[in-house]
Image (cartoon, rainbow, N blue to C red):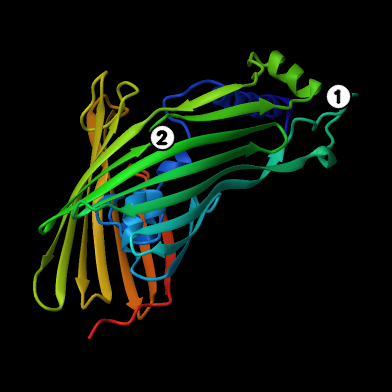
């Protein structure tokens, strides 16, 4: 390890902190990954058909469908060859015949990151004993409520979410936001709308950099980040779904969702200065409501390769699931969308019904 390498490492770290201090187009992206292997296997086309505890994330209106007194869910996945860990847990309970309360916890983190900002001592000597480690962790805590309205087929819900983001002892932020969602059943069709960060979500960042670190930032041409507010602008997701009963034992669920953002052009299929639209489609085939096969695609993007050729890519997802009485075990295999890289992630999730109601005779 030489001084140039150390300087380059500090420069990259400084650029990351400086970017956070601004109001970027992409903010709180860890909350856009998705939760539950069932939904991920369907390429996140799920706001309409969701009817379980994971609705606290996807569309709180869907909590009405838990069908039992309580329901819990857990999920674990890893990204970038295990460097980043992504975990999720949720609990929902029925308050009465028309309302449900849920809580969800999400953690996305990279742990044991080497901190080389104090590798060189005051005399200019390299001292590897001065290397420490830190974590860059994002937390999301959601409190959800769902209500069945008197209007037939209409369900509504909302989220209050608290966000905690922390980069070791260098930087941290607290955030607050609201979501609102609705589902409507019409004959064999289902429709849904989900407004994320409906009032915009605000993260207040604060920084705690040592004088030595600030000096290195200045020497490497990086700005010293200042305390500020990061804003996540609203997103509107619209969805439609339908279940087809192929036979008494085989069913097929199809859903189409359209993510609408209003913060300028994004690299999605439909884009403009006013609104950008990102479509994604998911399918689930079920056998006796016990075994499930899933697939979908989304994240359609265009880019120009090294040879100047325009290329269109998309993100394919597949998954399987099994139900054993009141226990659901799901698995999904996801790709980041660039077929030339093919970085796949394995996602496992577990869902359990508690106090399962007996079927009516």
Viewer-proximal residue, 349 or 184? Answer: 184
Q: Which residue is mark 1?
A: 124
Residue 284, given in percent of the width and then of the height, sits at: 22, 62
Task: Please indicate, yes or no, whether residue 262 appears anywhere in the rendered image.
Answer: yes
Task: Using a 10 Å C-alpha cutoff, classify the residue at mark 2 as few (fewer than 14 neighbours), some (14 to 19) or many (20 or more).
Answer: many
Task: Using a 10 Å C-alpha cutoff, classify the residue at mark 1 as few (fewer than 14 neighbours), some (14 to 19) or many (20 or more).
Answer: few
- Residue 230's place in the image compared with 360, above or below, is above
Q: CA distance from mark 2 to mark 1?
A: 48 Å
Residue at the location (44% across, 57% down)? Answer: 101
Question: Which of the 4 image quarters holds residue 114?
Answer: top right
Q: Find residue 77 and name its label.
A: none
Residue 209, given in percent of the width and then of the height, sits at: 74, 25
- Residue 169's place in the image compared with 10, above or below, is below
- Residue 304's place in the image compared with 146, above or below, is above
User: Looking at the image, which residue sits at the far bottom?
Assistant: 361
User: Looking at the image, which residue sits at the far front?
Assistant: 150
Q: Find residue 197 and name its label.
A: 2
Seen in the image, is 222 located left or right of residue 75? right
Task: Please indicate, yes or no, whether residue 343 appears anywhere in the rendered image.
Answer: no
Q: Secondary structure at mark 2?
A: loop
Viewer-proximal residue, 203 or 286? Answer: 203
């Amino acid at each position: 390890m030489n001084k140039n390498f150390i300087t380059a490492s500090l420069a990259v770290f400084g650029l990351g902190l400086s970017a956070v201090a601004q109001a970027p187009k992409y903010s709180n992206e860890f909350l856009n990954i998705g939760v539950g292997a069932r939904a991920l296997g369907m390429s996140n086309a799920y706001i309409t058909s969701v009817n379980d505890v994971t609705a606290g994330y996807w569309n709180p209106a869907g909590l009405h469908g838990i069908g039992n007194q309580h329901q819990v869910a857990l999920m674990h996945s890893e990204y970038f060859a295990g460097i980043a860990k992504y975990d999720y847990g949720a609990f929902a309970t029925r308050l009465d015949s028309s309302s449900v309360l849920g809580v969800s916890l999400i953690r996305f983190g990279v742990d044991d990151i080497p901190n080389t900002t104090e590798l060189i001592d005051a005399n200019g000597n390299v001292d590897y004993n001065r290397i420490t480690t830190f974590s860059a962790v994002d937390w999301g805590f959601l409190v959800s409520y769902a209500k069945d309205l008197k209007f037939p087929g209409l369900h509504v819900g909302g989220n209050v979410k608290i966000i905690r983001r922390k980069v070791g002892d260098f930087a941290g932020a607290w955030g607050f936001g609201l979501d609102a969602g609705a589902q409507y059943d019409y004959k064999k069709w289902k429709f849904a709308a989900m407004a994320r960060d409906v009032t915009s979500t605000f993260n207040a960042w604060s920084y705690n950099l040592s004088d030595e670190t600030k000096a290195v930032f200045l020497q490497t041409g990086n700005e010293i980040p200042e305390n500020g507010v990061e804003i996540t602008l609203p997103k509107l997701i619209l969805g439609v779904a339908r279940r087809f009963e192929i036979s008494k034992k085989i069913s097929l669920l199809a859903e189409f969702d359209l993510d609408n953002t209003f913060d300028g052009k994004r690299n999605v299929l439909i884009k403009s200065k006013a609104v950008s639209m990102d479509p994604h489609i998911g399918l689930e085939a079920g056998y006796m409501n016990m075994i499930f096969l899933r697939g979908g695609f989304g994240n359609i993007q265009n880019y120009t390769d090294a040879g100047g050729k325009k290329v269109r890519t998309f993100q394919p997802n597949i998954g399987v699931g099994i139900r054993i009485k009141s226990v659901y075990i799901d698995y999904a295999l996801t790709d980041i969308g660039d077929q030339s890289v093919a970085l796949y992630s394995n996602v496992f999730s577990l869902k359990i019904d508690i106090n399962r109601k007996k079927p009516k005779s």
